[in-house]
Amino acid sequence: LYSFTQRYGSESFDVRGLQLTIKNSDKTSLQVEIHTYDGLQSSFVEGSATLVSDTKAVMHETVDDDRCMIELEKLDEAIRIVELDCAGERDRELSYSGTVVKE
């Protein structure tokens, strides 16, 4: 599990975050789940990301065959997630982009 969490107020729901779970991987792909939240809003996406290099993988669609392009890049101590086109799979104010570290 990789995650990022930020508290921005005194209320229990004044927190935003991003979580990445890599369920299965092989030489060509990764099965990923990404959960993003901010306050009382949250969104979740799941799909298969194809490895395009030693450090990058790209997801093109969800497990439900909906268009959702997300790039995952392995850094030294983290994974950078870049949402390229996945607005239909999340609440409008949220984003799947961010950098997460292993818990």
Image (cartoon, grey):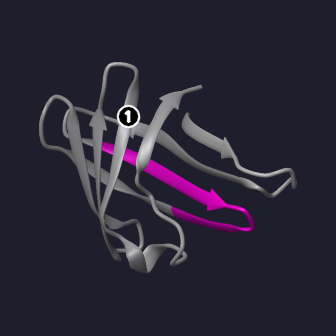
Q: Nearer the viewer, residue 85 or 1?
A: 85
What x and y, as percent, mark residue 28? 19, 39
What x and y, as percent, mark residue 14? 77, 56
Is 77 contained in the magenta span?
no
Q: What residue did someone put label 1 on?
A: 79
Q: Is residue 59 rendered to the left or right of residue 23?
A: left
Is 42 contained in the magenta span?
yes
Q: Nearer the viewer, residue 10 or 94?
A: 10
Residue in view at x 40 percent, y 75 percent: 87
Rendered-image quadrant of the N terminus: top right
Q: How many marks?
A: 1
What x and y, as percent, mark residue 98? 43, 47
The magenta segment is: 30-44
Q: Residue furthest left?
A: 53
Residue in view at x 61 percent, y 49 percent: 17
Secondary structure predominantly adopted by residues drawn in magenta: strand
Q: Is residue 94 rendered to the left or right of residue 68?
A: right
Residue in view at x 21 percent, y 39 percent: 56
Q: Secondary structure at mark 1?
A: strand
Q: Residue furthest front?
A: 9
Q: Nearer the viewer, residue 20 or 28?
A: 20
What x and y, as percent, mark residue 54? 16, 29
At label 1, which amino acid type do we have? Ile
